[in-house]
Image (spheres, rainbow, N blue to C red):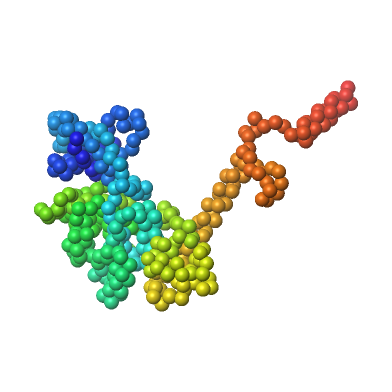
Amino acid sequence: MVIAKVLRRHAGGYLVYADELKDYFLCSLRGRLKKEGINIYTGDLVEIDPEDISQKENKRVNLNSAVITARIERKNFLEHPAIANVDQVIVVQAIRQPEWNPLLLDRYLVHLSLMLPDAQYCICLNKCDLGDKDELAILQNTYIQLGYQFCLVSAKKQIGIDQLKECLVDKTTVMTGPSGVGKSSIINSLIPSLNLKIDMDEDLFIGRHTTTTSELFQVPNNENTKTSSLIADTPGSSLGELIYPKPQDVAHQFPEIAQFIENCKFSDCLHLVETDCHVLANLEKISPLRYQSYSTIVSESIANWREQKDISKKIESSTVKYVGGKETKAKAIPKLNERYRTASRRTEKQKLSQLKNIKSQDEDAE
């Protein structure tokens, strides 16, 4: 049995890398796994058949062939983009072109913390050569105090690339963020031989969306590293794909706010305008930009959960009816399909009345 990691899915198989053999393999999926409906995604750890590894080299792609016989249990899974077994997430933003957006950064951190609570997080601010040094120092200090790693880089001028590379050692890292902030350019700086496609809007001087699929790439390591360092370039995510916690749970995604919530008077306190709120009493200890992000995300979460509630009510009203009283006294019972329902007495009377009218009209016509 040889364990390998899936680097890419494509039509016709899976590209995997086996640390034990220090080699790549183009794999197909064993028929039994297909019948069982087991899906294999980028980042999955799989077992490949040692007997099949000795097959003749695949001349079409110059790779050895093997067969995937089993998928090892995942430790986590990021649904969008679909990547398994993520150790670290790097959220990339640009300080200029496009302008840095603190709310967007915090939205990503909240969303990803809900999806991958056990992962490490790093913030990467690209195009740092275009920013004010004092502004960058304040931003860096704010997030480092909260426990996040923070890297200032410039893919164009090769600033901070070595520091970023140190964060990747022996990890499977996902690089995510909005389109056009330079994710592919940073990966090209980390792996010069890769030469990922990038594009630039000549009028706005900002990057265009070019990444369409998720793929893991190997980052060159020192000899001391035990396993390969892998990084995934992912398609830019839109705000519509972000998820929100319940309004009362948003505070738990902000460490500087979470430390004060236990002493609030009300257990469902949203820390916005409530009386005897311990968070509001300590507001001077929280970054104004971070608290503004928190307030906005709480408002968005409230709107999101109300919308979901309305949708669930509409679905429920089409499948459930209430009988036996009003409000709390009523009991919910499932609605039967129309063809299985017994007609009510009122409906039967209406049908008889219609038949009588038709019969009387026929008699008058005669």
Q: Is residue 315 placed above or below 138 in the rendered structure?
A: above
Closer-to-camera residue (133/347): 347
**Left or right: residue 130 compared with residue 158:** right
Tell me what residue is drawn at x 31 percent, y 55 percent. Answer: 119
Q: Residue at x 23, y 53 (%)?
A: 171
- Which of the two residues, 106 or 12, is positioned nearer the viewer here? 106
**Measuring 24% from the left and 48% from the top, which residue is drawn there?**
216
Horizontal and vertical percent for residue 53?
Answer: 16, 33
- Measuring from the top left, give residue 255's x and y in whole percent: 37, 66
Q: Is residue 77 left or right of residue 273?
A: left
Of the pair 279 and 352, the residue shown nearer to us:
279
Q: Quadrant of the C terminus?
A: top right
Left-right relation of 76 to 304: left
Number of marks:
0
Which quarter of the rendering shows the N terminus? top left
Residue 133, position in %: x, y?
A: 26, 75
Considering only vertical position in the picture, is 327 above or below 20?
A: below
Residue at image position (25%, 42%) is 45
Task: Please tell me whether residue 336 is drawn above or below residue 19 in the rendered image.
Answer: above
